[in-house]
Each structure stands twice: as C-alpha cells, then as structure tokens.
Amino acid sequence: MPENWNHYIGIDFDRIDEAIDRIAAEPELLKEISMAGRAWVLEHYSPVPTALRFLETVGYPFPHDLLQQLDATSSIPFSYANSNDGRS
C-alpha cells in the first residue's frame, strides 16, 4: 500500500500546521513524493497489474513467476504515461 509522506501527503486537518511547516521546511519533498507516488501508481494500477489482479481474483491460473518478470510500466506508451491531459 502507498505510504504517507513517501507516496502521498495525507493531511490531518486537526494538525494542518504540522504539514504546512514540514513542506515549507523541506520544499524538495513535493517533487520526491510526487515522483514516488507516480511510480507506485504505475507499478500497481497501470493496465497490466490491474488485469493480472482481476484474473487472479476470478481464479485464472496465472504463473506467479511470470508476474515477477513483467515490467508493468513498459506496457504503457511513454507519451501516455507522462501525459497531462486529465486522464491520470
């Protein structure tokens, strides 16, 4: 599962000042977290891993050693994976 302050920034609205202070003190965090979050999403929610989870859920016998060999992001054209057209 994605981790707070590693793959996303979860804000506790009862302690919002802590998050604001941390971001202000470490502005490079925004880029690092956004990149880690994007990589996590592509690894777990791009079409290939999503389809494989579905097949496994419905009982399709898929060899697990093959799963380890697949690079989930390679099935997504670079221009689509990096597009900023609102589909992400």
Image: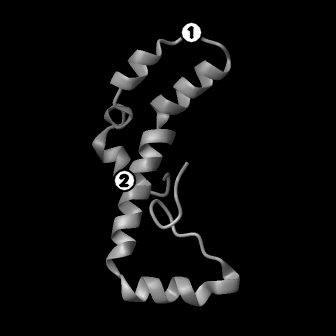
Q: Earlier in the sequence, mark 2 or mark 1?
A: 1
10 Å crowding of disc 2: few (<14), some (14-19), many (20+): few
Q: Residue 83 carries which label?
A: 2
Q: Where is residue 69 in the image (x, y as percent from the top left)?
A: 33, 23
On screen, residue 81 above or below 68:
below
Residue beneath the point at 60% across and 20% down = 56
Q: Which mark is residue 76?
A: none
Q: Nearer the viewer, residue 70 or 76?
A: 70
Q: Where is residue 35 in the image (x, y as percent from the top left)?
A: 36, 60
On screen, residue 38 above or below 63:
below
Residue beneath the point at 48% across and 67% down = 5
Residue beneath the point at 39% across and 73% down = 30
Q: Which amino acid does label 2 sit on?
A: Ser
Q: What element carries label 1?
A: loop
Q: Name the residue under label 1.
A: 61
Is 10 on the left or on the right of 37, as rendered? right
